[in-house]
Image (cartoon, helix red, strand yellow):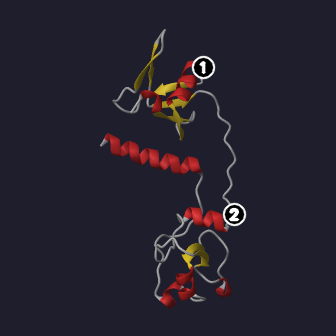
Amino acid sequence: MQVLEQSVVVFSQNYLPLCRVNIKRAIVLLVTNKAEPLDFSAEPGWLVHSPSLVLSVPKHIRLKIAAAERMWKVPPVNRREVLRRDHHSCQYCGTNKHLTLDHVIPRSKGGLHTWDNVVTACSRCNSRKGDKSLAEVGMQLRTKPKAPVHPAVSFAEKFWVDLQADLE
């Protein structure tokens, strides 16, 4: 892979992994003194050659400037967001055909229209379950429904797991 197609992990001032940027953006942040290199691994990074200089670009950089934290709200429980969370597949059988929304605890039995009670279900499984609980029908969920998390948090979790695997 060519050097200019690589990506660099950007950390906030308090070392929270924020995102990945392409190497060109990382160079701009380093040259304008808005970021500093971090050395987490034994691998040095990449050498980028220009006509007048050679720049060493690390695999991880930390912002020196205070980045305003963007406000993020949990999205509303709607069809598009539930389908996205459940990867467009039925949470009972796994198919991706004729998808609908299902309340795990039916609304008629006190179930709420919340992230931990609404799942994607194919019309066949939704009809089979009907207005009953999972135990009454003998069905079970493939994954436990939960509200989406902040993108920076999910990126940070994945980054630290990947880094730990690299160091082992």
Q: Where is residue 135 shown, x and y percent of the image?
A: 49, 87
Q: Determine the residue located farthest toward the left in the rendered image.
A: 168
User: Looking at the picture, does residue 131 appear above or below residue 51?
Assistant: below
In this figure, which residue is indicated by the disc labeled 2? 76
Q: Position of residue 84 (x, y in %)?
A: 58, 62
Give the labeled residue for mark 1. Answer: 32
User: Residue 31 falls in which quadrant of the image?
Assistant: top right
Q: What's the residue at 51%, 73% (across, down)?
A: 90
Q: In which quadrant is the N terminus drawn? A: top left
Q: Which kind of residue does numbered mark 1 sit on?
A: Thr
Are dots 1 and 2 in contact, CB under 8 Å? no
Residue 45 position, x and y percent, is 40, 27
* Distance Cα–Cα, label 1 vs label 2: 39 Å
Label for residue 142? none
Q: Is residue 96 above or below residue 70?
A: below
What kind of residue is marked 2? Pro
Say which element carries label 2: loop
The 10 Å Cα crowd at callout 1, few under 14, some 14 to 19, many 20 or more, is few
At x 55% / y 49%, what residue is drawn?
153
- Dot 2 crowding, Cα within 10 Å, few <14, some 14–19, many 20+: few
Q: Indicate the quadrant containing the C terminus: top left, top right, bottom left or bottom right.
A: top left
Q: Which is nearer the N-term, disc 1 or disc 2?
A: 1
Residue sitting at x 53%, y 23%: 27
User: Residue 10 appears at what percent x and percent y?
Assistant: 53, 35
Residue appearing at x 62%, y 84% in the figure? 106
Along the line of sight, the residue nearer the viewer: 77 or 42: 77
Specify whether 16 is left or right of 79.
left
Is 35 situated left or right of 165 in this image?
Answer: right
Helix, strand or loop under label 1:
loop
Q: Residue furthest front?
A: 97
